[in-house]
């Protein structure tokens, strides 16, 4: 479906779904994915997506992202993903929450009562957390699970800027779900060659390893597989082999450099499973949903975007042995 039609359908779909949730709560519950058995799913279906939902950047600027000021379209796509993948876990980065009308507020209603959502706030370099461009809520990461959350913990994993110029914070978040043997976690790693990156990644590893059960770590790591800064994670976790390529077929991020007029594809979004897992081959399947990643030129007055983020959703089906 052309993205223009998808966008129009998205708005209609979300409005209708919100109305149905308020008036016909039973119908919304019926259409939502059903609960997993008490011992948890034997195959944990995980989706992770940087939705670039925090406003900022116009077409032709380096910070541009499609539909950034349209939370209804973003939420419709997330909800569709949950149904298409029969997902148990939806991990999200650059998402707004904590207020009525925010992405996560809309998502809770759209997913229905069988789902639980938890979030952790992060701050921009100016130290502010409130989402820009008229969006409701505060910036951060989130995890939605098809089950009941019985515990959640988070912390900022980015060390302070030694120069004191940046006040950015980037959290790591883990949630425990009743009856599940695995703990899902998510994070967002600082881009670039800042010396703090290795400290942040090591901190994320140490935080996640505090769980006394197998874990699934997802997120936007801002690094291609094989990057030296990812070594602390590679030593402690197993990454899905289907995502280890660096070709366009496994790319999860489309980067435009408007000043140079060039672009490139990268695989920055990853799914890791702790090596403490008792399942010898934990990944049943992994992949990239490239249809939801914008691949059009980021040029002023350019063509309509053909996706909803500069990142693609990544999915992984994980054998739990349950």
Image: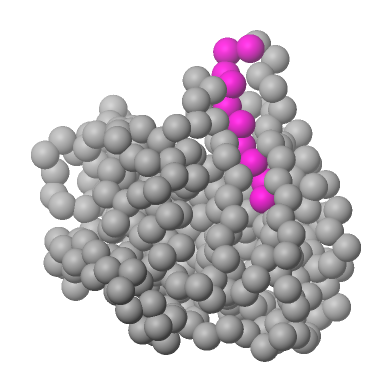
Is residue 87 within the magenta segment?
no
Q: What residue is rendered at 30% in x and 34% in y? A: 133
Q: Residue 68 or 178: which is nearer the viewer?
A: 178
Is any atom of residue 311 visible in this view? no
Q: Quadrant of the C terminus?
A: bottom right
Above/below status of 45 relative to 76 = below
Query: Horizontal placement of 237 versus 265: left or right?
Result: right
Above/below status of 157 relative to 53 = above
Give the image quarter of residue 118.
Answer: bottom right
Q: Quadrant of the N terminus?
A: bottom left
Is residue 168 within the magenta segment?
yes
Is any atom of residue 40 visible in this view? yes
Image position, residue 12 (x, y; %):
19, 66
Q: What residue is rendered at 50% in x and 73% in y? A: 113
Above/below status of 63 relative to 269 = above
Write down the region rendered in magenta.
Answer: 164-173
Image position, residue 44 (x, y; %):
64, 78
Image position, residue 6 (x, y; %):
20, 66
Q: What residue is rendered at 36% in x and 84% in y? A: 27
Image position, residue 134 (x, y; %):
29, 35
Q: What residue is rendered at 22% in x and 37% in y? A: 59
Its colouring scheme is one colour
Give the image quarter of residue 120.
Answer: top right
Query: Horizontal placement of 116 versus 273: left or right?
Result: left
């Amino acid at each position: 479906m052309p993205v223009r039609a998808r966008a129009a359908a998205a708005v209609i779909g979300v409005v209708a779904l919100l109305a149905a949730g308020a008036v016909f709560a039973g119908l919304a519950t019926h259409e939502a994915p059903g609960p997993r058995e008490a011992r948890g799913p034997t195959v944990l279906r995980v989706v992770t997506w940087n939705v670039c939902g925090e406003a900022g950047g116009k077409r032709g600027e380096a910070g541009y992202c499609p539909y950034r000021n349209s939370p209804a379209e973003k939420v419709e796509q997330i909800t569709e993903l949950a149904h298409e993948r029969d997902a148990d876990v939806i991990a999200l980065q650059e998402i707004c929450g904590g207020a009525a009308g925010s992405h996560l507020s809309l998502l809770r209603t759209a997913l229905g009562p069988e789902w639980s959502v938890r979030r952790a706030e992060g701050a921009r370099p100016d130290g502010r957390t409130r989402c820009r461009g008229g969006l409701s809520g505060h910036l951060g990461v989130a995890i939605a699970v098809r089950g009941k959350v019985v515990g959640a913990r988070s912390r900022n994993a980015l060390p302070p800027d030694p120069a004191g110029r940046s006040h950015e914070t980037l959290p790591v978040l883990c949630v425990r779900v009743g009856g599940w043997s695995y703990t899902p976690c998510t994070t967002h790693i600082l881009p670039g060659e800042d010396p703090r990156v290795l400290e942040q990644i090591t901190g994320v590893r140490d935080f996640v390893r505090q769980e006394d059960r197998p874990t699934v770590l997802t997120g936007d790591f801002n690094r291609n597989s094989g990057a030296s800064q990812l070594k602390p994670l590679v030593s402690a976790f197993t990454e899905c082999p289907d995502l280890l390529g660096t070709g366009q077929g496994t790319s999860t991020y489309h980067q435009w450099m408007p000043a140079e007029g060039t672009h490139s594809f990268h695989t920055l979004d990853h799914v890791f499973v702790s090596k403490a897992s008792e399942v010898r081959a934990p990944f049943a399947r992994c992949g990239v949903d490239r249809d939801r990643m914008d691949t059009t030129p980021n040029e002023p007055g350019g063509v309509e975007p053909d996706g909803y983020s500069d990142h693609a959703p990544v999915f992984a089906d994980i054998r739990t042995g349950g």
